[in-house]
């Protein structure tokens, strides 16, 4: 199914910003918020994982049902998972597009990657170990 993705800051994501390798940060930034009707349409339940693909890339995220998102739209917190599917083009503004991104979402049994693994997948190098 096709959805419109937006991303931005959230309180949980912000509370872990100084601990970006923690499980809390991973959980806060790898959650995709989706309307309950869309969850039902996908044939899954809140808490299930989905594969989210844009023109830039793809990630596996954990769903969280919420009525705060209109049907047909999804939301994720800023972070490495959002960066993997939003890209870095800034149109000369210095800020990448984090809103109004078309994504395809499908259920998956694949695990959510750790922040370390995700960073390596997009070309980063582990540090501090």
Image (cartoon, rainbow, N blue to C red):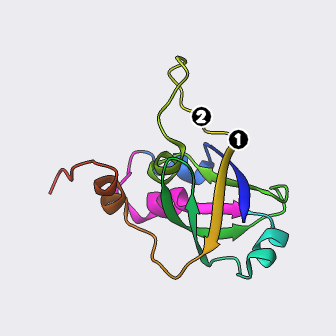
Of residues 115 and 72, which is closer to you in this image? Answer: 72
- Residues drawn in magenta: 18-33
Does the stretch in magenta take in 60?
no
At numbered mark 2, what does the secondary structure look like: helix, strand or loop? loop
User: Would you say the residues marked 1 and 2 are in contact, meaning their CB atoms lie under 8 Å apart?
Assistant: yes
Q: Dividing the image into 4 quarters, which one contains the C terminus? A: bottom left
The one of 19 and 89 positioned closer to us in this rendering: 89
Which residue is pictured at 32% across the width and 57% down the height?
121
Q: Quadrant of residue 46?
A: bottom right
Q: For mark 2, does the 10 Å Cα neighbourhood hold few (<14), some (14 to 19), or many (20 or more) residues? A: some
Residue at horizontal 72 percent and vertical 66 percent from the top: 1
- Asked whether 13 or 57 is in front, the reply is 57
Instruction: Give how far across and how far down residue 4 sits, in percent.
Output: 73, 50
Residue neighbourhood size for the residue with mark 1, other residues' Cα within 10 Å, grouped as few (<14), some (14–19), many (≥20): some
Q: Position of residue 118 (x, y in %)?
A: 36, 58
Q: Which residue is mark 2?
A: 97
Q: Is residue 33 left or right of residue 60?
A: right
Identify which residue, 7 or 53, lies in the foreground. Answer: 53
To which residue does mark 1 refer? Answer: 100
Please state the horizontal and vertical placement of residue 83, each as a whole percent of the image.
48, 45
Furthest-top residue in this view: 92
Residue 115 is left or right of residue 1, and the answer is: left
User: For the point 84% across and 60% down, which residue is it?
Assistant: 71
């Amino acid at each position: 199914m096709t959805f419109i993705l937006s991303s931005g800051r959230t309180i949980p994501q912000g509370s872990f910003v100084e601990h970006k390798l923690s499980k809390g940060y991973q959980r806060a930034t790898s959650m995709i918020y989706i309307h309950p009707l869309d969850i039902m349409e996908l044939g899954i339940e809140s808490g299930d994982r989905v594969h989210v693909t844009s023109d830039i890339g793809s990630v596996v995220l954990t769903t969280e049902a919420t009525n705060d998102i209109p049907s047909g739209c999804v939301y994720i917190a800023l972070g490495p998972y959002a960066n993997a599917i939003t890209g870095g083009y800034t149109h000369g503004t210095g800020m990448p597009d984090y809103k109004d991104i078309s994504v395809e979402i499908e259920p998956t049994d694949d695990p959510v990657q750790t922040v370390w693994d995700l960073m390596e997948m997009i070309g980063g190098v582990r540090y501090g170990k």
